[in-house]
């Protein structure tokens, strides 16, 4: 039985009990009919005071001879023609006795059940003992009914009035319920087996009682090899304590909960799975079945891990003291790196939201850089230039700046600054040295010229 029927096990047990009760009632009613036959039902004479009994306890006329009991009773002769039916039968199947008597019963038996009906009639006639079978009959409204029939001879087959008594029980509702359950089971099985999510059922101590194909496929194992083992056999040892606490809370509280953990496949590969766990009732209605649905998130976790590494690497690059980054809109700092704050002698908080004007010693330099850079980057090109910036201490800081458009719709640009102060200082020192050397050379040349004149 598929574990998916566990929620309906109570209904199945009720149906089984109903069948047993129906069988007992049928046996008791059949026994009462036998006793009635053995007594030999009496028939009034024309005078209305004398009764007659037919041989073998069966009425000679057969009219109105079956008792008024709740069981659906019908008698047929050796050829299968209807002799009599009690009111319960005519009511259940919708045929008036006056139109039914004398017709073969097979006329109202579903064509697909004719062979079964003839077999049943033959067995009872030849062997003279009761036999039971199930087939389909046609209601007067043309609706097909599932009927359980017990046939018993009313007289030996060699007797002139050999007849067969049929006790009929309408099983249509029961069979419809069974078919509905079978269809539901089939839909459940198709849903579970065809989906890519991992589905499992387990006992409260973690023993797997069911896994779908996707579950087994992810582990590289067969379903049979997994069922009966503990689900903790497949969980990473690092995650097992957390998973045990999580599942214990679900089992004890009965409240659904989700989580994620690593599983270990047969080849040793780690699989990340996001789970949703809940409790289902068992056959007695107690929450004793752990139902888990998982989705493989290995690729997502690997991507997130790679993004974390990339983020750390980018942070290391962005936050270096040698290079500064800034996102600017309307010539205001929207975001600055720690590297740029360090280059300028400010904190990140002081620069964020501030105007870029604080970088310049005068308004002319501020406007000149704007006129040179923004038309260029707004056209999709890259600006590169050098900036004599003002340090928070008031000193000069030489920066090499480059900028590109970041979001044209919002006029946001990305600027990268690197310090070239040391280079500028070296260039200045070189120029000063060159000037000093030139001055010394001129002085030396003048001194030489004076000596020559003397």
Image (cartoon, helix red, strand yellow):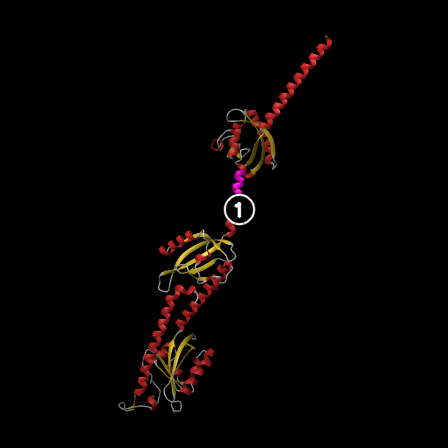
Which residue lies under the disc numbered 1? 306
Residue at the image position 46 percent from the left and 59 percent from the top: 199
Residue 350 placement (x, y as % from top left):
47, 31
Characterize the local packing of mark 1: few (<14), some (14-19) or many (20 or more) Cα atoms within 10 angstroms: few
Q: From the viewer's perspective, tell me whether residue 357 is left or right of residue 160.
A: right
* Image spot of residue 245 (x, y percent): 39, 52
Give left or right: position of 353 versus 162.
right
Magenta residues, start to end: 305-316
The percent position of residue 274, horizontal first and vertical second, equals 46, 53
Mark 1 element type: helix
Tell whether position 172 is magenta.
no
Q: In which quarter of the image is residue 170?
A: bottom left
Is residue 115 in sight in this rendering?
yes
Q: Residue lying at the far left in this picture: please name it.
A: 49
Where is residue 272 drawn, in percent x and y? 48, 52
> 8 or 242, which lies in front?
242
Q: Quadrant of the N terminus?
A: bottom left
**Can residue 41 be seen?**
no
Is residue 414 positioned above or below 283 on the image?
Answer: above
In front: 390, or 356? 390
Picture quarter with the C terminus: top right
> Magenta-highlighted stretch: main secondary structure?
helix
């Amino acid at each position: 039985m598929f574990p998916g029927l566990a929620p309906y096990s109570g209904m199945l047990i009720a149906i089984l009990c109903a069948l047993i009760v129906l069988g007992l009632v049928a046996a008791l009613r059949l026994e009462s009919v036998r006793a009635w036959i053995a007594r030999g039902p009496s028939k009034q004479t024309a005078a209305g005071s004398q009764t007659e009994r037919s041989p073998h306890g069966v009425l000679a006329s057969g009219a109105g001879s079956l008792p008024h009991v709740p069981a659906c009773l019908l008698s047929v002769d050796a050829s299968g023609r209807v002799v009599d039916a009690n009111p319960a039968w005519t009511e259940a199947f919708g045929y008036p006795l006056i139109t039914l008597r004398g017709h073969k019963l097979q006329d109202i038996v579903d064509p697909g059940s004719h062979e079964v009906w003839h077999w049943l009639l033959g067995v009872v006639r030849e062997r003279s003992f009761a036999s039971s079978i199930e087939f389909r009959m046609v209601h007067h409204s043309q609706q097909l009914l599932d009927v359980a029939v017990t046939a018993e001879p009313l007289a030996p087959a060699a007797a002139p009035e050999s007849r067969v008594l049929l006790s009929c029980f309408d099983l249509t509702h029961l069979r419809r319920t069974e078919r509905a359950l079978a269809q539901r089971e089939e839909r459940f099985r198709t849903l579970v087996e065809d989906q890519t999510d991992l589905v499992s059922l387990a006992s409260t101590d973690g023993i797997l009682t069911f896994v779908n194909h996707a579950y087994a496929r992810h582990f590289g194992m067969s379903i049979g090899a997994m069922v009966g083992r503990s689900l903790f056999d497949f969980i990473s040892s690092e995650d097992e304590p957390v998973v045990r606490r999580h599942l214990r809370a679900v089992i004890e509280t009965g409240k659904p909960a989700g989580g994620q953990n690593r599983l270990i496949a047969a080849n040793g590969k780690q699989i990340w799975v996001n789970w949703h766990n809940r409790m289902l009732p068992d056959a007695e209605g107690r929450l004793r079945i752990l139902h888990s649905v998982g989705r493989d998130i290995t690729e997502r976790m690997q991507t997130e891990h790679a993004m974390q590494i990339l983020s750390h690497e980018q942070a290391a690059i962005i936050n270096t003291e040698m290079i500064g980054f800034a996102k600017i809109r309307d010539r205001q700092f929207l975001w600055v790196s720690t590297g740029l704050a360090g280059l300028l002698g400010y904190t990140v908080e002081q620069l964020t939201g501030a105007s870029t004007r604080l970088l310049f010693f005068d308004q002319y330099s501020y406007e000149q850089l704007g006129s040179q850079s923004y038309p260029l980057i707004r056209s999709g090109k890259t600006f590169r230039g050098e900036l004599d910036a003002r340090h928070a201490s008031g000193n000069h800081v030489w920066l090499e700046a480059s900028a590109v458009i970041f979001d044209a719709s919002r006029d946001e640009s990305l600027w990268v600054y690197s310090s070239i102060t040391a280079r500028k200082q070296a260039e200045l020192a070189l120029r000063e040295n060159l000037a000093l050397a030139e001055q010394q050379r001129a002085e030396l040349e003048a001194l030489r010229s004076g000596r020559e004149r003397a």
